[in-house]
């Protein structure tokens, strides 16, 4: 049987999925609750990544080792750092980099030591499905979340996401991070704190991985204010709509 793991970053994002779960069977492992069951007739395990790269790696490893999942789909929020990536937009990841990885001068900055690479690619087929589900799930949603930048429609982007163990909440810091990454040839659309870790675990095990992030803030001085309100009011609804549209495509 093919079981899909649906990984959420925050409890608010997971709640709607738990409410839809048929034959829910919660299991506790590694101090985490895993919800086994069915969504639209498909076998799934719902889990919280927890926050930060190590916590997310533990959750992903447990999903693979203890629940034998065949693929992992991640939904969460992120700070927008790419030009034209606004609050209320959605970014479907094509690949991940760790913006806080720096083993220089032993290895080039951003390269994962002993992997010979900085970038971890998402699974192309699963990512195409997630992009289609995002378009379908969010059709008609408006992008009127950024008061300074009200727009008639929301943007759906796909590209590189940068992960690191830091909530980026300063315009200068966001700019510096972006410039340093660009100097190394990387242009992330968004920053968050888990995706690259899950991507690395999935790379190690050969498990297909895809991720979608709703932009909750611009990683600037307002980020900590925008973030909590956005998670409860918008991101949780988006995550549910996207996953509901993904299920028939799997
Ligand atoms: N997740 C959502 N917003 C973020 C930010 N500004 N930095 C890191 N992770 C985030």
Image (cartoon, rainbow, N blue to C red):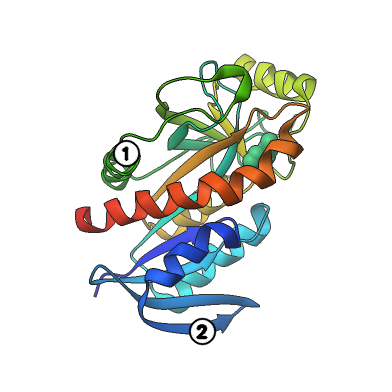
Q: Which residue sits at x=35%, y=39%?
A: 138
In the rendered image, the vertical position of residue 183 relative to residue 201, given as above or below: above
In the rendered image, the vertical position of residue 15 relative to residue 227, given as above or below: below
Identify the mark nearer the N-term, 1 or 2.
Answer: 2
Disc 1: which residue: 131
What numbered label is drawn on residue 27? Answer: 2
Q: Which residue sits at x=38%, y=56%?
A: 206
Residue 119 location (% of width, % of height): 50, 35
Residue 172 location (% of width, % of height): 79, 19
Q: Which residue sits at x=29%, y=52%?
A: 246
What numbered label is drawn on residue 65? Answer: none
Q: Sort mark 2 into few (<14), some (14-19) or many (20+) by Cα contacts within 10 Å.
A: few
Disc 1/disc 2 C-alpha distance (Å): 30 Å
Dividing the image into four equal quarters, which quarter contains ligand 1?
Answer: top right
Q: Quadrant of residue 174?
A: top right
> Residue 212 or 16: which is nearer the viewer?
16
């Amino acid at each position: 049987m093919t079981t899909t793991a649906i990984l959420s970053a925050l409890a608010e994002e997971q709640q709607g999925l738990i409410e839809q779960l048929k034959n829910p069977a919660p299991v506790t492992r590694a101090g985490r609750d895993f919800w086994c069951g069915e969504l639209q007739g498909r076998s799934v395990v719902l889990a919280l990544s927890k926050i930060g790269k190590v916590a997310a790696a533990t959750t992903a490893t447990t999903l693979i080792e203890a629940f034998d999942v065949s693929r992992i789909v991640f939904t969460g929020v992120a700070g927008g750092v790419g030009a034209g990536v606004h609050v209320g937009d959605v970014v479907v990841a094509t690949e991940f980099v760790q913006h806080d990885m720096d083993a220089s001068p032993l290895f080039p900055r951003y390269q994962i030591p002993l992997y010979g690479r900085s970038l971890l690619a998402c699974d192309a087929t699963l990512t195409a499905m997630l992009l289609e589900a995002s378009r379908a799930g969010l059709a008609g949603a408006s992008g009127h979340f950024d008061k300074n930048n009200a727009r008639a429609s929301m943007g759906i982007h796909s590209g590189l996401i940068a992960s690191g163990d830091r909530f980026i909440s300063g315009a200068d810091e966001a700019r510096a991070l972006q410039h340093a990454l660009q100097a190394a040839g990387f242009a992330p659309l968004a920053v968050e704190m888990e995706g690259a870790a899950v991507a690395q675990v999935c790379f190690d095990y050969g498990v297909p991985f895809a991720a979608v992030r709703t932009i909750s803030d611009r990683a600037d001085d307002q980020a900590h204010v925008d973030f909590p309100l956005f998670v409860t009011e918008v991101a949780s609804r988006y995550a549910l709509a996207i996953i509901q549209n993904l299920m028939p495509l799997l």
